[in-house]
Image: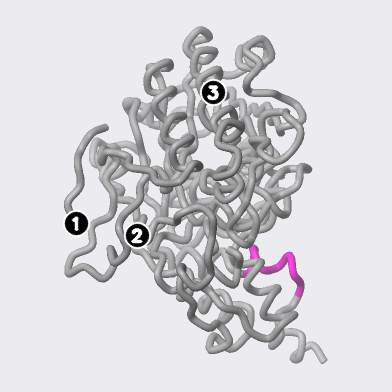
Amino acid sequence: MSRARGTGRTDATGRDEEPGRTEDAGRTRPGRTDGTSGGEDTGRPDGTGRNESTGRTGPGRTGSAGGRGDTGLDGPGRTETGRGGEGVGREDGGTGAGGVRGRVRWVVVGAGGLLGREMTGFLGERGDDVVALPRRALDITDAGACAAVIRRGDVVVNAAAWTAADDAELDEDRAFTANAYGPAVLARTCAAAGARLVHVSTDYVFHEAPGGPHDAAPTPYAEDDLPRPRSAYGRTKAAGEWAVQALCPDHLIVRTAWLYGRYGACFPLSIARRLREHGEVRVVDDQFGQPTWTRDVARLVVELVLAAAPSGTYHATAAGWTSWHAFARAVAAADGADPALVRPATTAGIGRRAPRPAFSALGHDAVHRVAAAGADVAPIGPWQERWSYASALVLGALGPGPERADAAH
């Protein structure tokens, strides 16, 4: 697959960013969030998710993504906060040669969403100073309000976004306000305050022709591949990236995708719930991407910041790739259901307003380069491994699965 270079419905298409809107309390609101971007409204479990976000009323608020300080499993070789049992950074707040030293003050915007809540909780577990701002607490299009809160932090994480891809096709202006104008305001304000801006973006800035993963040698998108969005959501997120690059020299653009986590509605929860309630579910088998745990994204963001990673674009997704259908079967197995109850469907057969990328796996060269330079930074592991560690925590919100419930009796 050649590229130009430059800088679900649970029964249907699912999506990381869209699978589940989370409602405002901490957003991942059990329902909206982005994943993909992971904004406060990361999306409906059916893939239409919307982010709570900009302080506006009505569909299309950009959201935030905040989180509690519960602990979670990170898997072998990693503690709750970092790697090798040491955590991300040292007790004095430093990370070794070339890294950030001293205590870092964080501001998390979109702190009520799936990723924002995880980010806030992760930082809280580390004992960091965190100001968590869900949608209702900050309108990111209000420059004065942004200036008042950003001066309280050294690093601003923007997890706010409108991720309702189908809704954006009908109201691109409002999606642009949340996903491009709001980030532009944050970027100007961070630049003026001398704060580093971490802006969360999405795989939807890319769109490949169907058949990508069936090519002889499918190639994940590199960080400097030229964005070619086809959806309104993707266009507005790409515009937000460009605004951040132009207006805030000290930035990290962190693209993620197919997010799931414990702080709100997401694809795995939707699949498990539908299987429990209806006995079977139909999921598309012709969209390929990288299921990614929000905790892994939060950990990687912290490591990049503490390592003083160079300004630029980074990809925070799990290694490897799979289809929504195969991921749904893995969810069924983890919940004690028969994976055969997950039936295949096609994108064309489901019918969605916004075009979805057929293949949107993201490469991780930029993270590898930072790690190779000696920083305490590690890419996210294979999606199957990470799901095996996260599944009990994520699905635990539904209570015992079929097999465990039977065993209890």
Give x and y (percent) for residue 313: 35, 34
Please say whether residue 104 is visible from this viewpoint: no
Say if residue 390 shows up in the picture: yes
Identify the image quadrant of the N terminus.
bottom left
In this rendering, position of residue 55 left or right of residue 247? right
Instruction: Give the SS element for disc 3.
Output: helix
Query: Mark 2 touching mark 1, by CB under 8 A?
Result: yes
The residue that appears at 73% across and 54% down in the rendered structure is 30
Spatial distance from mark 2 to mark 1, Cα to Cα? 11 Å
The span shown in magenta is 392-399
Q: Nearer the viewer, residue 133 or 273?
A: 273
Q: Which mark is residue 364?
A: none
Mark 1 burial class by Cα count in 10 Å: few <14, some 14-19, many 20+: few
Amino acid under disc 2: Phe
Q: Quadrant of residue 24?
A: top right
* Circle 1/circle 3 CB separation < 8 Å: no
Instruction: Residue under label 1, please give it.
Output: 1
Report the disc number at residue 359: 2
Q: Position of residue 213 (x, y in %)?
A: 29, 66
Residue on which the image places disc 3: 181
